[in-house]
Image (spheres, helix red, strand yellow):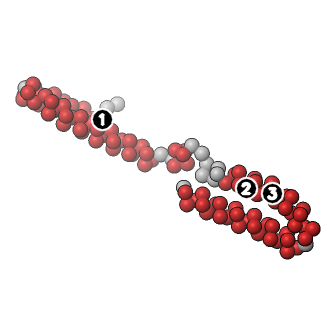
Amino acid sequence: MPDKRLRDDLQATLDARRDLGPEYETALIDSFVERLDATIAARVRSELHHQDPVRAKGRHPSAPMVPIVLGSLGIGVPLTAIAASAGGPGLLVAWLSIVVINVAAAVAIMRRS
C-alpha cells in the first residue's frame, strides 16, 4: 500500500498545478520526483540495514576456510607418516607448521570480511 505522505504529496502537487497553471508543471513535477526519489532511497537503505549480512553475501562466512582445512588434513596425514620416522621433533614441526598456516589463513579471511 502506498505511503500516505507520498499520496498527500502527490495530491498537493496536483492541486498546486491546478492553481498555478501549466507553466509551473515542470517545476512541480521535478519537486515531486525529488521527494519520491528520497522516499525510495530511504526505503532501500532501511531494507539493506535490516538485511542479514550472511544471507546478503549468499554464503556462510567460514566457507573460504573449508578448502584450507581440508587441504591441511590431506597434507597432514602423509606428513605425519614421514615426520614420525624422524621422531617426535619432526612430528611437532610438521603439525606446528600446519597450525600456523591455518591460523594465518583464518586471520587473512577475517580481515577481508
Residue, far right: 85
Instruction: Please report whichever mark, 1 or 3, sits nearer to the chain's N-terminal start.
Output: 1
Task: Nearest to the eye among marks 1 and 3: give it.
Answer: 3
> Which residue is the site of mark 2?
69
Q: What residue type is labelled 2?
A: Val
Left or right of 93? Residue 48 is left
What whole-number distance in Å separates the C-alpha atoms at marks 2 and 1? 51 Å
Drawn side of residue 92 relative to residue 113, left or right: right
What percent of the width, then of the height, locates residue 81?
A: 90, 62
Which amino acid does the dot numbered 3 rest on?
Ile
Residue at 60 percent of width and 61 percent of height: 108
Quadrant in which the N terminus is drawn: top left
Q: Can residue 89 be seen in this view?
A: yes
User: Looking at the image, is mark 2 or mark 3 earlier in the sequence?
Assistant: 2
Residue situated in front as seen by the camera: 66 or 97: 97
Residue 3's tag is 1
Q: Is residue 9 visible?
A: no
Provide residue 96's location: percent of width, then percent of height.
Answer: 76, 69
Question: Mark 1: which secondary structure?
Answer: loop
| Cα–Cα span, label 1 and label 3 | 60 Å
Q: Residue at left 70%, top 62%? A: 102
Which percent across, then down, holds residue 100? 71, 67
Which label number is shown at residue 75?
Answer: 3
| Residue kind at label 1, given as amino acid type | Asp
